[in-house]
Amino acid sequence: MARRMWQRGPDGEIVRAPTAPEEAVSALGPVGSPRPPGRAHLGLAFRLGARDTYDYLGTLLLQSFVWTVLVALGLLGGQAAGVALTGSLPPRLGAFLSLLLAGVAGVALGSPITAGIFRYARNAAARLEPELFDLAWGFRSGFRRALGLGALQAFGVLLLAGNCYFYLAQRLPVLVVVGAAFGYLLAFWGLACLYQWPLLVEQELTPLAAAKKSALLVLDNFLFTLAVGVVVLLLTVVCWATVLGGALLWAGMTAMLLTQLTRELLRKYGVLGPDPTLDPIAGETHELRGLGHHE
């Protein structure tokens, strides 16, 4: 049967009939529509993260250096202020308060710059023309959220680690079990923290919402997350073993990797659209559109 090239439109005008490739495109949905729920591809996410690290290496080195300087200034400045303010207190109490002030200052300076680095990584992953001024996002638009998430992460680590140490130090079998339980919770919290900064930046969530979503991602993708945690831990050890590698590479590279890994999980649930450069669904759709135009 011959295919009709023309048909009457809804207002009576004569319009060109849709071709088969165009109909196929319509069935798939518009270009850039979310991927149907499926499986997250760990290897692809790591490759994309490594590609982004290479593509934006110069800016990444600068970001990591700025992050290291600000966090170091916060820690050293907080400790110095603590020593000055607690000089008349007993040594142990003074040391504790000095460490506490150092941690507070480190979180206060480190959280906004961390959010800015992840903002840059997100724009790089989405090919949204990332620029160096993205580093200021955590100090401008996302300051409260960044500070809240940094404080929440630090509080969670201190609470769980403190309870784990306290119960394990009692050396009673029942309390040792309780301490081990807190140790597992600490490990779980550490895995959840891997997704919290990318979620905060990608969806502009509140700190509590980012923590909740990250916990759900870990529970539903435990082996995926465990592999991510192992790789990030190895990269951390390798980078900071040389000190210079950690100061110039760790923060930016980790942000690039975790951003792509989190985005891959969001694609699994159909929350995020396809990758703008490599997603096969987007590529097939573009090819079908091309066939429709050339016919």
Image (cartoon, rainbow, N blue to C red):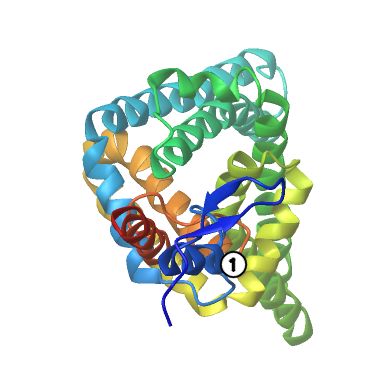
Locate residue 83 relative to residue 133 in the image: left or right. right
Q: Nearer the viewer, residue 115 or 153?
A: 115
Amino acid under label 1? Ala
Name the image quarter holding residue 179: bottom right
**Which percent across, then down, holds residue 229?**
45, 65
The residue carrying mark 1 is: 187
Locate residue 79 relative to residue 205 in the image: left or right. left
* Residue at the (48%, 74%) spot, across then down: 224
- Residue 79 shows in the view: no
- Residue 19 shows in the view: yes
Q: Nearer the viewer, residue 11 or 51?
A: 11
Locate residue 252 relative to residue 263 in the image: left or right. left
For the N terminus, give its image quadrant. bottom left
SS state under label 1: helix
**Which percent across, then down, holds residue 88?**
71, 17
**Which percent across, then down, holds residue 218?**
61, 69
How packed is label 1: few (under 14 Cα within 10 Å), some, or many (20 or more)?
some
